[in-house]
Amino acid sequence: MQHERNEQTAQAETLFRSFMKTEGLRCTSERIDVLQEIYGADSHLDADEIYNRLRKKGTGISRATVYHTLDLLFRLNLVTRIDLGHHHTHYEKTLGVANHLHIVCQKCGKVSEATSNQLAGMVEALCSENGFTLGSFSLQVFGECRDKEACAERARQNEAE
Ligand SMILES: [Zn+2]
Ligand SMILES: [Zn+2]
């Protein structure tokens, strides 16, 4: 598992470096740090989380660099943008990750991920019908946890944070 993940990170890095070269942009170590942070994470991160994690690791990265790098990675289809209902964007790696649906609880913010080949096929067909080639997709569905007790407990913890 770990091995596989490193390969994806390496693959993403190669794509990113050649893209930057083509665009005439400098591929600084800070930009590579952002890529590695996303590819090393198992969950969805927002720009601030990425910024804070990198700062804790002792890098002098700026917020602007984090945002700009995320934009570049998005243009390259190496990350997707997700709206999890927090009024800001979350980012998720794309390489090695199947397109999926996020089911988000509106009360406690719990996120479940669901994959479906049928759904992926439908999205691809819809893109094609509209003259697009599918890159990546992330779909969000908002609902409420059925387990009310666990949901309320999570909501309380969120409040406390
Ligand atoms: Zn996801
Ligand atoms: Zn909930």
Image (cartoon, rainbow, N blue to C red):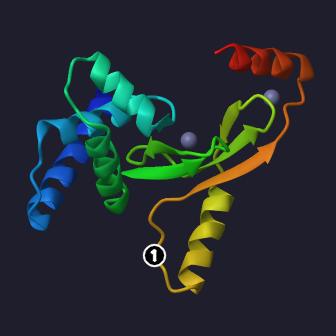
Residue 84 horizontal side relative to residue 1, left or right = right
User: Vertically, is 7 above or below 70?
Assistant: above
Residue at 48%, 59% in the rendered image: 136
Whether residue 40 is visible to the viewer of this picture, yes or no, is: no
Residue at 81%, 32% in the rendered image: 107
- Image quadrant of residue 159? top right
Image coordinates for residue 115, horizontal then vertical, percent: 63, 47
Q: Identify residue type, mark 1.
A: Thr
Locate the C terminus by quadrant.
Answer: top right
Category of crowding for the residue at label 1, using alpha-carbon neighbours closer than 10 angstroms: few (below 14), some (14–19), many (at least 20):
few
Residue at 22%, 33% in the rendered image: 61
Residue at 51%, 48% in the rendered image: 98
**Nearer to me, 85 or 143:** 85
Locate the N terminus by quadrant.
Answer: top left
Q: Which residue is mark 1?
A: 133
**Nearer to me, 152 or 13:** 152
Q: Quadrant of ligand 2?
A: top right
Number of numbered discs visible in the structure rendering: 1
- Image quadrant of residue 110? top right
